Amino acid sequence: MPPYTFNPNRLKIHLKLAVNRLKLAQQKKNVLNKQARKDIAALLENSKEESAKIRVEGIIREDYYIEALEMLELYCELLLARFGLIEQMKQCDPSISEAVNTLIYAAPRSEIKELSLVRDQLIAKFGKEFALNAIENKNNCVNEKLIQKLMFSAADPYLVNSYLEEIAKSYNVNWKMDPSVNDSLLGIDYLNTTNKPEFTALPDMELLLSMNNDHGGNNKSSPIISSDSDCLVLDAPAPQLPKNKKKDKLDRPPSPLLPHDFSQNDFATPPPTYST
């Protein structure tokens, strides 16, 4: 079977389909999250605080994932707006480089099939070496915020409490976290304790399976062709974790579960309210 070749018309179609699917996925998850918030409010009303804390961690992870989908949607729209650069340039233009690298990196880590088709076309256009740089995030070519949003993590207790308080407020539940508990959480030095927030990248199962099956277990990166979609798939090592570069006033690294847009000081402000 010949290698999968770049087709600009096919890429444009897949980008448009990916934008639509990303919008639908965000809407669906927002609806589910709203229902989950109602369920958590009911738990708080019935004094089931521990159950509420466990449930709210799932909401936090979904909020992060929704934000990641929104970023990927914007990158797809950017490539559509500057599609002429993809068609005309042999090398990736700097003005779309971050978008292309991030889509190649994130596609197998999302649940959006259309993004994988976009990724295959981008790899066919810019080549294997370019794609491997994106997959390995060499020279920080992938958007660091998106990498963090695509990661699971043990929830920051302070952020969990902030979510619970805002949910209780939104649904008129008389619940408040003990101020002394929040004060103690603020005083934790995550740099000098074994209770550091830890996070792990979502596994790219397709790539891992490809690596295991590549020449009888040889881990050297090489392209393979998927018989289902006739698309190019690349093997890759595990992605590099982003580095926390800023610390807050307590000399703590920013919480990996705190959305960047929520606060300028790495402390969680209350999440958005939802009407009943």
Image (spheres, rainbow, N blue to C red):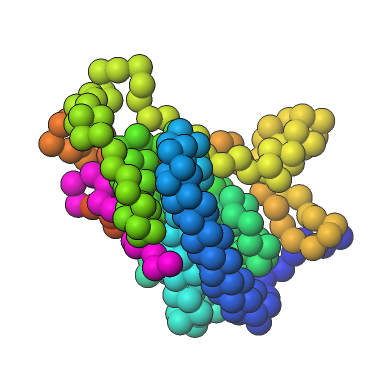
Front residue of 95/107: it is 107
What residue is at 23 percent from the left and 44 percent from the top? 267
Magenta range: 264-276
What residue is at 82 percent from the left and 30 percent from the top? 216
Residue 218, position in %: x, y? 73, 30
Quarter of the image for the N terminus: give it: bottom right
What residue is at 61 percent from the left and 40 percent from the top? 203
Q: Is residue 241 left or right of residue 12?
A: left
Front residue of 258/150: it is 258
Residue 276 visible here? yes
Residue 60, position in %: x, y? 44, 48
Residue 8 visible here? no
What residue is at 67 percent from the left and 49 percent from the top? 234
Q: Is residue 186 left or right of residue 174?
A: left
Q: Is residue 168 left or right of residue 267?
A: right
Residue 11, position in %: x, y? 63, 75
Q: Is residue 209 left or right of residue 245?
A: right
Give the prevailing secondary structure in the magenta stretch: loop
Quarter of the image for the C terminus: give it: bottom left
Instruction: Give the quadrant of residue 185.
Output: top left
